[in-house]
Image: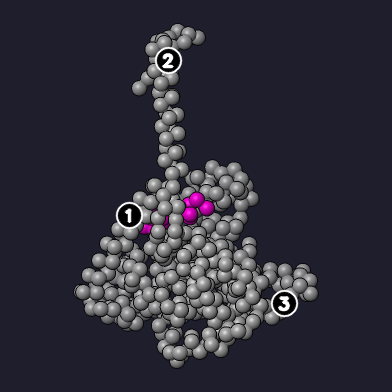
Amino acid sequence: MYRPLNSESPPGESPPKTAAAAWGVERAEARRNAASNRARRNIKVKVVDLYNFNLEVSREDAVTINQVLERVKEQGRVWWAMEAKNGAGWYLQPEISSQADTTNRVSSLSLSTITGSMQLKKLIRKGIPPSLRPRVWMAVSGATKKQSTVPESYYQDLTQAVNGRETPATRQIDHDLGRTFPMHPWIDSADGRAALRRLLVAYSFRDSRVGYCQGMNFVAAMLLLVMKTEQDAFWMLAVLLENVLFNDCYAENLYGCHVEQRVFKDMFKKKFPRLAAHLDKIEFDVSLVTTEWFLCLFAKSLPSETTMRVWDVMFNEGANTLCIVALAIFKMKEEELIRTKHVGEVMKVLHDATDHAYNPDELLTVAFDKVKVMSSQTISKQRKKEQLEVMAELERRVQRLNPGDQDSGSSGSQKVMSAH
């Protein structure tokens, strides 16, 4: 390797011509290599992911996507081997699939049941094969149990009963349909939009207190792509909003979302004090990104298979999964974020981090192996503390609003993703 200056040259003299010439050649070659690398990064290739999203990605991202597809196939073989060993649908047994209950009553369970539950948890964290996701999600989330409490025709009867009825919620749903994954070949088709509308309208009547909130459209669309049938997607949406997520996340005043944002900020400052101090210094509020992450459950931010891997864990282990994954994203980009100088840079770093997160194993490894979070009990205590603060703040906001601007019958139709 040539040095820019010959160490034996007297002070003030130029290096020998041979060294200077070689140095110039090296610099030119370095510039050509850098330009070549930039050109390669700028070359886009078209790929279709597991859920038929059409993507234009760099060659490096395309390689990652193909590697993920191979790992999905490999994980599928692991699941089928477990089927052969433990019997078909072994994970459908209530004692095994109810992870939350298992945690609270280990002493009353048999060793085989505990072992089966732990095996399931480990398998789910490594990913559920797409072909098995509908059945596994229905079992571990409690959707199957919820559906069993009503007649089989419940969803069909509900959709027929509300057909043609108009409310502020249905008007907002109609407004958002065209904005929901507009590049997806099925969601953006007439059949896809009709199915998504039926699903969202039906739920808005099932729970008029929640009605409809922007963000639910992306969640419901992904559920349709995974579950294959409207009825199963409906029950997954119901168990998600009524049992898995924390109370009132989609309430008209977004009360639950405000609470979760405060809880997350507390966790964030405790986990990353240096980063938190830097972001405060440049006046960046983490809720600028986390509000959308939590309301859309990452469906609008992460690639589809990465989102599904997060949901695999969420449906089995609970909504705290969302906070853990959000912390992992910040941890993966911590040093880069600390070097940012303004809000726009932070937004770009986080957008690029989520937009190119095609490797779910990398994200989830950081989430569960490197991010040590507070216990569920500690988080629950923090949540109760924040609930009082949020309620007081919301009451102050209501008092400042002009009563003439309020629509008490909106059923949440005017809710937007702004919880900071």
Marks 3 and 1, how far apart at CA: 51 Å
Q: Is residue 216 visible?
A: yes
Image height of 284 relative to 394, above or below? above
Q: Which mark is residue 345?
A: none
Residue at (56%, 89%) from the top-left corner? Answer: 161
Mark 2 = which residue? 20
Q: Is residue 275 left or right of residue 81?
A: right
Quarter location, residue 305: bottom left
Q: Which mark is residue 407?
A: 3
Query: What main secondary structure does the magenta stretch of the protein show?
Result: helix
Q: Residues within 10 Å of mark 2 (few under 14, many from 20)?
A: some
- Is 186 a magenta residue? no
Q: Amino acid at mark 3?
A: Asp
Q: Which residues are magenta?
A: 351-365
Q: Position of residue 142 (x, y in %)?
A: 42, 80
Image height of 393 relative to 61, above or below? below
